[in-house]
Amino acid sequence: MAAKQISLPAKLINGGIAGIVGVTCVFPIDLAKTRLQNQQNGSRLYTSMSDCLIKTIRSEGYFGMYRGAAVNLTLVTPEKAIKLAANDFFRHHLSKDGKLTLVKEMLAGCGAGTCQVIVTTPMEMLKIQLQDAGRLAAQRKLMPETVAAGTVETKSPTAMQITRQLLREKGIAGLYKGLGATLLRDVPFSIIYFPLFANLSNLGKKSTEGPAPFYVSFISGCIAGSIAAVAVNPVDVIKTRLQSLNRASTEDTYSGVTDCVRKIMRNEGPSAFLKGAYCRALVIAPLFGIAQVVYFLGVGEYILSFLSKKNN
């Protein structure tokens, strides 16, 4: 059992599979979250998540809800793999000297959240540009007063075009715009999520030995994920605003985290920091519920075992 717990290749496979399955299921809601968070007073195109999804389908078709999905599906594999495997790695080593206390669980989560931003930041940077392109295109048609005079409508850029432009103009730092805000979101998220998930799972165990049943892992992942998601939503709003490169003429631009907080408070009020919180909870809950089921069912361990037998 101990070997299974510290099998990093298996953990990486589990995290990757979980990320792909989860993202495929909830991506349209994530798109709605990004568009709602990027709306500012005076340029509100969508009134709610359902309104956003309906208008997106009408103007961009069904697949419009999956703008940026290719980037997310490509990079979510290493991102989820790093996050889940790093947390397991830190928990294993922190428990060597005795009982895994709540403080140690939070430290493990902190380590996992810090590691994952290596992949999370550029993934979110590209995904946000692609997800928000449809909102800006719709504003040109439905709210022309928010678009600067003389602005020419252009085709939505691809992930590769955005990447090349950022690398050409700003180097690798261009892909890591919003790194500070991403850290401020992902580290507290992991500090809240992983200890909460572990303790909820322990409550559902039928015995002190062995993992919790898969349905307990799923429910625990959903509850812990939604609570952590809502808790860090204000920072997610800031991160989304900082990473958005294109804006309507009536929308604010920001020079950093402090400037963003100040302008949102002044122009939109404190409630703006909760924009997209409902969507974010709906995204994160099943995403982490699915992730934990795949993770604890040991799909990665099974694949490695099968390949090992085949090679022998």
Image (spheres, grey):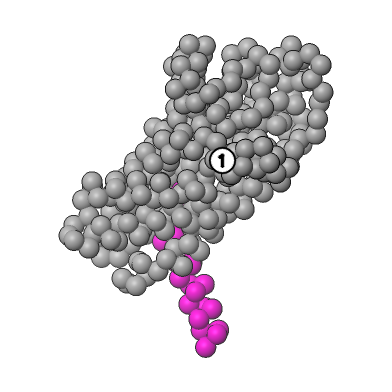
Could you tell me residue 81's position as x and y percent?
48, 57
Residue type at the position of mark 1 = Ala
Q: Is residue 65 visible?
A: no
312 or 289, which lies in front? 312
Q: Which quadrant is home to the N terminus?
A: bottom left
* Residue drawn where x is 35% and y is 60% of the image: 89
x and y percentages locating residue 194 in the rendered image: 35, 48
In the drawing, does residue 236 fall left or right of residue 168? left
Tell me which corner region of the image, top left, top right, bottom left or bottom right, holds residue 193: top left
In the rendered view, tell whether residue 275 sits above or below residue 159. above
Q: Is residue 289 magenta?
A: yes
The reply, left or right, for residue 62 in relation to residue 282 is: right
Task: Report which residue position mark 1 lands on.
Answer: 173
Q: In the displayed image of the protein, which residue is found farthest to the bottom?
A: 312
Q: Classify mark 1: helix, strand or loop.
A: helix
Q: Establish if 87 lies above or below 148.
A: below
Q: Residue at x 59, y 25 (%)?
A: 38
Closest to the observer, 35 or 213: 35
Residue 46 shows in the view: yes
Q: Quadrant of residue 196?
A: top left
Which residue sits furthest left?
98
Q: Is residue 239 magenta?
A: no
In this rendered view, identify the residue nearer to me: 55 or 181.
181
Asked whether, in this view, residue 192 is left or right of residue 36, the answer is left
As displayed, is residue 160 above or below residue 312? Answer: above
Give the magenta range: 288-312
The image shows residue 28 at horizontal and vertical percentages of: 63, 39
Task: Residue 214: give x, y in percent of width and height.
Answer: 41, 58
The residue at the point 29 percent across, 48 percent down is: 107
